Image (cartoon, rainbow, N blue to C red):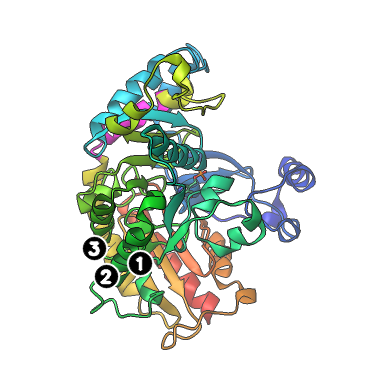
Amino acid sequence: MSGVPRAGAGGRTRELQRDDLRYVWHPFTQMSEWCAEDPLVIEAGEGCELVDTEGNRYLDAVASLWANVHGHRHPRLDAALADQAGRIAHSTMLGLANVPATELARRLVEIAPPGLAKVFYAGDGASAVEIAVKMAFEYWRLRGVEGRNLFLRLGEAYHGDTIGAVSVGGIDLFHGIFGPLLFPTVKAPSPYCYRCPLGVSPESCGTACADELDRLLGEHADAIAAVIVEPVVQAAAGMITHPSGYLRRVRESCDRHGVLLIVDEVATGFGRTGRMFACTAEGVAPDLMTIGKGLTGGYLPLSAVLTTREVFDAFLGPPDSHRALYHGHTYTGNPLAAAVALANLDVFEEEDTIAALEPKIALLERRLEELVRPLAHVGDVRQSGLMVGVELVEDRESKRPFPLARQTGAQVARLAREHAVIMRPLGDVVVLMPPLAISLEDLDRLVSVTADCIARATA
Ligand code: PLP
């Protein structure tokens, strides 16, 4: 594996870099900053590595935005894609069924938490969240219950970037400018133990944040359609790992107050936390579950909402009852994506991916304890499966953050490039989220590089 000598970039690379800077607007990117540097242009991938246009290889330590599962160019997934392309790339699900989307729905229901019986497809995680929100809202209307117009969501939650998904999110930066466009919600405190929003101590609080959620539900029960949560880990908030038992308490509160539970497994699903779906660690079966990212092994945009027969049945009626769910996208249930998703599930079985994670998770935990946690500016190390967030602070005692302008997390990622590792932090939380297929050797190297870059960036 080797890093990039950008200065030596060849003519084709320079041309691509120039055209990117001239024509492309990148997501979540301050483009004035982007334009100050030559972009790295990725041309290929193999296993857990990305290959740029100069042939340099990098460890994909963010799994191409938390999506890649079995590695890039996995022969099984490549073959499924080619095979499906030889049949048909796309046909609509409005008025027609298609082979892989039908088969995939059955397979998803078979592996889903109990009670989830129906699959509604979408493209990205955010569109699945939009659908879940609409389903939950309409479900009550169709049952003749008026006034359940609110959703309860957590502080620091992230469910995607469309207007509905931002409305049920809790990241202030995204809420600021779009505030006037968002629908109102009830906010419960995030179980962010390192910086507890309730100011209590995790050792003795008895999960006070779950009590507060229950109290809020009691106060607004008749007005709330559903609670929406990221199960076990709030990823985009900085890999906030929830205390054990929290999700179970949320489920119990929903049951007590007669409110639906939407569990957003877009980031945590498909093995990320060491289980196929994170909510099963708490023995929780949601009323609605959103999935995306790893659904296609990180190959193609496909997401879905899984829900119960009870929710589904509420939408049934004669054609003139207008009880259908008025939602769909052009590429809903795209056959190419569904075929790859089926191969993704096959590989989970054939390679026993979940069982193979155990030693990786253990190694990661051990090496983080040895190399990363002792560093002077590491405030907190949070891990669930192969999801890791390392929160950097200027002062460990007071947990004082580094000044924003110092861009400490971004500096760590910049230094990691010199070691041929691609990272993307969340503010000053360094994120490790490699493909599940990563080898023990690469995982070990990733932690060493992380420790080294944190030490240098915070010196
Ligand atoms: N939900 C969760 C929990 C996520 O982490 C994300 C993305 O990171 C989304 C939804 C949105 O998914 P997408 O980026 O595919 O729209």
Q: How many residues crowd around disc 1 within 10 Å: few (fewer than 14), some, or many (20 or more)?
A: many
Residue under label 2, please give it.
207
Badge 1 amino acid: Pro
Q: Nearer the viewer, residue 365 or 219?
A: 219
Q: Are marks 1 and 2 in contact (CB under 8 Å)?
A: yes
> Who comes first in sequence, dot 3 or dot 2?
2
Q: Are marks 1 and 3 in contact (CB under 8 Å)?
A: no
Where are the magenta residues, as a range? 339-352
Kindly identify which numbered label has been placed on residue 191: 1
Q: Position of residue 272 (x, y in %)?
A: 34, 49
> Who comes first in sequence, dot 1 or dot 3?
1
| Quadrant in the picture for residue 377 | bottom left
Can you tell me whether the CB of the residue at mark 2 lies under 8 Å from the nearest atom of ligand 1?
no
Q: Are marks 3 and 2 in contact (CB under 8 Å)?
A: no
Q: Give the structural element (helix, strand or loop) at label 2.
A: loop
Q: CA distance from mark 3 to mark 2?
A: 9 Å
Q: Position of residue 339 (x, y in %)?
A: 41, 23
Badge 3 amino acid: Ser
Q: How many residues crowd around disc 3 within 10 Å: few (fewer than 14), some, or many (20 or more)?
A: few
Task: Specify whether 395 is left or right of 199.
Answer: right
Q: Position of residue 412 (x, y in %)?
A: 53, 68
Q: How many residues crowd around disc 2 within 10 Å: few (fewer than 14), some, or many (20 or more)?
A: many
Kindly identify which numbered label has been placed on residue 31: none
> Who comes first in sequence, dot 1 or dot 2?
1
Badge 2 amino acid: Thr
Residue displayed at 48% across by 77% down: 455
- Our reading of the magenta stretch's main secondary structure is helix
Q: Give the structural element (helix, strand or loop) at label 3.
A: loop
Residue under label 3, please give it.
244
Task: Judge whether residue 244 is colored magenta.
Answer: no
